[in-house]
Amino acid sequence: MKVIDLTHTISEDMPVFPGSETPKLTTKSTYEKDGFKETLLQMYSHVGTHMDPPAHIFANQKTLDQFSPEQFIGKALVVDCRI
């Protein structure tokens, strides 16, 4: 089976849900000053590649961690919608 990873790299210019703010990435530690690099990530859950579990819109329903990874693997059709 061929695996296609649809993950977006987290960046300040990645796709967001219309009306949502774009992610903010702030350098908090650097190699030179702190001996390691660390970035503060601030973003909404509707940024880039994501899945909405039933709990997103229904109270007391399943969250993503309650699904097995196998439930997200299967056959797909790729449609090129570029003009």
Image: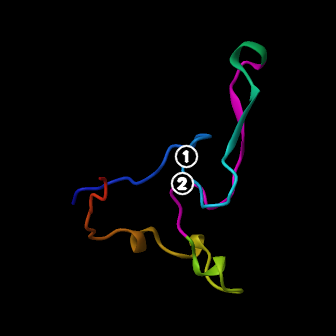
Picture residue at 70% right of the left edge, 52% below the top: 21
The stretch drawn in magenta includes residue 45: yes
User: As displayed, is residue 43 above or below residue 39?
Assistant: below
Distance Cα–Cα, label 2 vs label 1? 6 Å
Which numbered circle lies on residue 33? none
Which numbered circle lies on residue 48? 2
Instruction: Estimate the x, y position of residue 60 in percent, counting from the top left.
Output: 70, 86
- Along the viewing direction, whichever of 41 and 11 lies nearer the viewer: 11
Instruction: Estimate the x, y position of residue 57 in percent, counting from the top left.
Output: 65, 81
User: As displayed, is residue 18 above or below residue 31?
Assistant: below
Badge 1 marks a residue whose secondary structure is loop
The amino acid beneath tag 1 is Met
Task: Give the residue at mark 1.
Answer: 14
Most extreme residue toward the left, as rendered?
A: 1
Give the image quarter of residue 35: top right
The segment highlighted magenta reads 34-51
Give the image quarter of residue 30: top right
Main SS of residues in magenta: loop
| CA neighbours of label 2 inside 10 A, class few (<14), some (14 to 19), many (20+) | many
Badge 2 marks a residue whose secondary structure is loop
